[in-house]
Amino acid sequence: MMIPPVRLSTSLGLAWAYAGQQAAALATKLGLGPLGGRAFLPRAVCRAVDAELKRLETMVRRILFLTAMETPLPEAGPAPQRKGVCQAAPPADGAGPRVFGLPVFRLTETSLSPAKKASRLAARLAARARYEGARSDPEARPGPQDLVPAKRLMNRFAALEQALSDPEAQVARFRRTLARIRADKSLPLPVANEPPAACTGRQNTPVLRELFWTLHDAALSWLPILDSS
């Protein structure tokens, strides 16, 4: 007997409002101007922004997934052509195409393969070796206030803001993605086995950790339905 998936319709709106509030607070903290971007940020700030984006991205993905799964999925259509990380958004009100395409919010996530885990470990070990080699030269040692490129973080933030500003379009897009996953069992499921440590670590309040686990467990409860449909 299959256990029915968890439904959180009455709570998803509050979680969505919280994500939007935190995204606005992050924009204020970063001092983003009209262009909504910073070319460089201190290394320590980049780490903090990356952790905050992981929390908000994970929350938004879980909410969109749960909302998309609450009604029957459409029939799978043809797979879209793969494009780059940034693609032009549909023009609004008949306006011409954008000069710069908006980054697209990533809807699916997968657990890291052993090969990718090994490559990340190798990269961390190489970075540590470089740091140890520079210890004798204080000027060459990387510091928390060193300015580093922030383009990738700003693209993620722009994609998150776009998703929060138009959830209906994101839900429709997610439903099309889920329909393809349901039709093609070789595609990976959209929810990783565990949320990232940025969501469940002790740096979060107990209430926030409980919210993440509730959303995550609810999403996992839908996967057998998606996988067996």
Image (cartoon, rainbow, N blue to C red):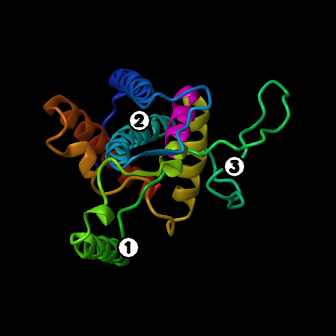
Which residue is at 43% across, 42% downward? 61
Residue 71: image location, x then y, percent? 50, 35
Residue 226 makes an appearance in the image: yes
Q: Earlier in the sequence, mark 1 or mark 2?
A: 2
Q: Give the distance between the C-alpha atoms of the residues marked 1 and 3, in whole angstroms.
A: 26 Å
Number of numbered discs on residues:
3
Tag 2 secondary structure: helix
Considering only vertical position in the picture, is 21 above or below 85?
A: above
Residue 154 falls left or right of residue 18 = right
Tag 1 secondary structure: helix
Residue 11 falls left or right of residue 190 = left
**Looking at the picture, which amino acid does disc 2 mark?**
Ile
Residue extent of the magenta highlight: 156-166
Residue 41: image location, x then y, percent? 43, 44
Tag 3 secondary structure: loop
Which residue is at 61% across, 45% downward? 103
Mark 3 or 2, closer to the camera: 3
Give the image quarter of residue 112.
bottom left
Residue 117 falls left or right of residue 97 = left
Q: Which residue in the protein does label 3 denote?
A: 87
Front position in the image: 9 or 144: 144
Residue 70 is one of the magenta-drawn residues = no
Q: Give the distance between the C-alpha atoms of the residues marked 3 and 2, in whole angstroms.
A: 24 Å
Q: Which residue in the protein does label 1 denote?
A: 116
